[in-house]
Image (cartoon, rainbow, N blue to C red):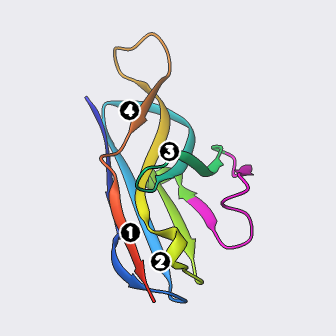
Amino acid sequence: QVQLVESGGGLLQAGGSLRLSCAASGSIIRINVMGWYRQAPGKQRELIVAISRDGTTNYADSGKGRFTISRDNAKNTVYLQTNSLKPEDTAVYYCNAVILAHGSRGYQDYWGQGTQVTVSS
């Protein structure tokens, strides 16, 4: 089995910093794209940014300007960083990864459990 475990969420201050981590574990052969999504109450889940294995990034409009994504392939971990939180950033943040697992015939999408980020003013 493959799991994605997220950490770093919580109650935070507007204008402050956030660093989310997501570590993949299990019988992993290869991880392709990893990315971060978020879902605010009453809203659809939206892409923030994704990153390929070689570091190529794809920022959605919601992620441009304030968010930075990075990954550590040796640790099977992806990060999301911002230094300018806004109350509008309040949402559940989800990690996503496209992974080839041992015993699988192809790549599959995996999702983390989600971590709550609440930004107060």
> Which SS type dominates the magenta stretch?
loop
* Residue tagged 3: 45
Q: Are marks 4 and 3 in contact (CB under 8 Å)?
A: no
Horizontal side of 15 relative to 100 (left or right) equals right
Counting residues from the N terminus, which is met first, the one under dot 4 or under dot 2? 2
Q: Nearer the viewer, residue 37 or 44?
A: 44
Q: Residues within 10 Å of mark 2 (few under 14, many from 20)?
A: some
Marks 1, 4: nearer the viewer = 1
* Residue tagged 2: 18
Residue 71 at x, y = what percent? 55, 57
Q: Does residue 1 show up magenta in the picture?
A: no
Q: Are marks 1 and 2 in contact (CB under 8 Å)?
A: yes
- Find the distance from the CA under tag 3 to the CA under tag 1: 14 Å
Q: Amino acid at mark 2?
A: Leu
Magenta span of residues: 54-70
- Figure quadrant of residue 118: bottom left
Horizontal side of 118 relative to 81 (left or right) equals left
Residue 59 at x, y = what percent? 72, 54
* Residue tagged 4: 28
Q: Nearer the viewer, residue 87 or 8?
A: 87
Residue 13 at x, y = what percent? 43, 88
Judging from the image, what secondary structure is the residue with disc 2 in? strand
Counting residues from the N terminus, which is met first, the one under dot 1 or under dot 2? 2
Q: Residues within 10 Å of mark 1 (few under 14, many from 20)?
A: many
Looking at the image, residue 22 lies above or below residue 8: above
* Residue tagged 1: 117
Judging from the image, what secondary structure is the residue with disc 4 in? strand
**Residue lying farthest to the front in this orientation:** 42
Q: Residues within 10 Å of mark 3 (few under 14, many from 20)?
A: some
Judging from the image, what secondary structure is the residue with disc 3 in? loop
